[in-house]
Image: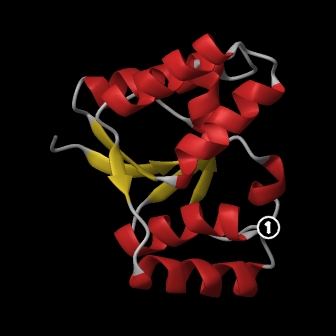
Amino acid sequence: MAGLKKIIDASVAVKWFSKEQHSVLAFMLLEDYRNGKIDLVVPDLLFYEVANVLKCNRLSEKDIQAALSSLFNSGLGMSRVDEITIAETVRCALQHNTSIYDAAYIALSKLFGCELITADEKLLNKNIGNITHIKDYQQS
């Protein structure tokens, strides 16, 4: 794909499998990705976080597995942990007083020089920088 690169976190991806506030916007973002208008990149951590949220939402094992299969087959750009990424993640976590989990998304955003899209109000309230709420997503 040749679209503009964006990082999404689990709070956005979960909206593809659970009807939540701003799910329509999350689907618009997914549609833009499928149409090649944007590229989506995620850390491999996203898959664990989505599975955990769906488990907490009391989805069946079958439904959780189906959601994860859909994610794997979507072709999302998956960034695996390496020395550079984990070092930036730790630096971001310490600098912004956030969890390593949240910092993984922030670090990718910084390393790729692109926007992070989230629905995590707590993360947004930290005013870190190139982070946008899904509610502000405008379809390409």
Regarding residue 37, the answer to whether it shows in the image is yes
Residue 13 on image: x %, y %: 56, 33
Residue under the image location 76 percent in, 69 percent down: 99
Question: Dot 1: what SS?
Answer: loop
130 on left or right of 43 = right
Q: Is residue 25 visible?
A: no
Between 1 and 52, the one lying in front of the other is 52
Q: What colouring method underlies this structural image?
A: secondary structure
Where the C terminus falls, by quadrant?
A: top left
Q: Amino acid at mark 1?
A: Lys
Q: Quadrant of the N terminus?
A: top left
Label 1: which residue? 126
Seen as rendered, the residue at the extreme front is: 61
Vertical placement of 120 versus 113: above or below?
above
Which quadrant of the view contains residue 73?
top left
Q: Measured from the top left, where is residue 86 in percent x and y?
A: 51, 79
**What residue is shown at x 64% (from left), y 69% (from top)?**
103
**Residue 80 place in picture, x, y as percent:** 39, 62
The vertical placement of 107 against 123, above or below, is below
CA neighbours of label 1 inside 10 A, class few (<14), some (14 to 19), many (20+): few
Q: Quadrant of residue 31?
A: top left
The quarter of the picture where residue 79 lies is bottom left
User: Which residue is pictured at 36% across the width and 51% down the height?
Assistant: 78
Q: For this view, does 77 lie left or right of residue 118?
A: left
The mark tally for this picture is 1
Residue 69, percent from left and from top: 43, 24
Q: Is residue 114 above or below residue 86?
A: above
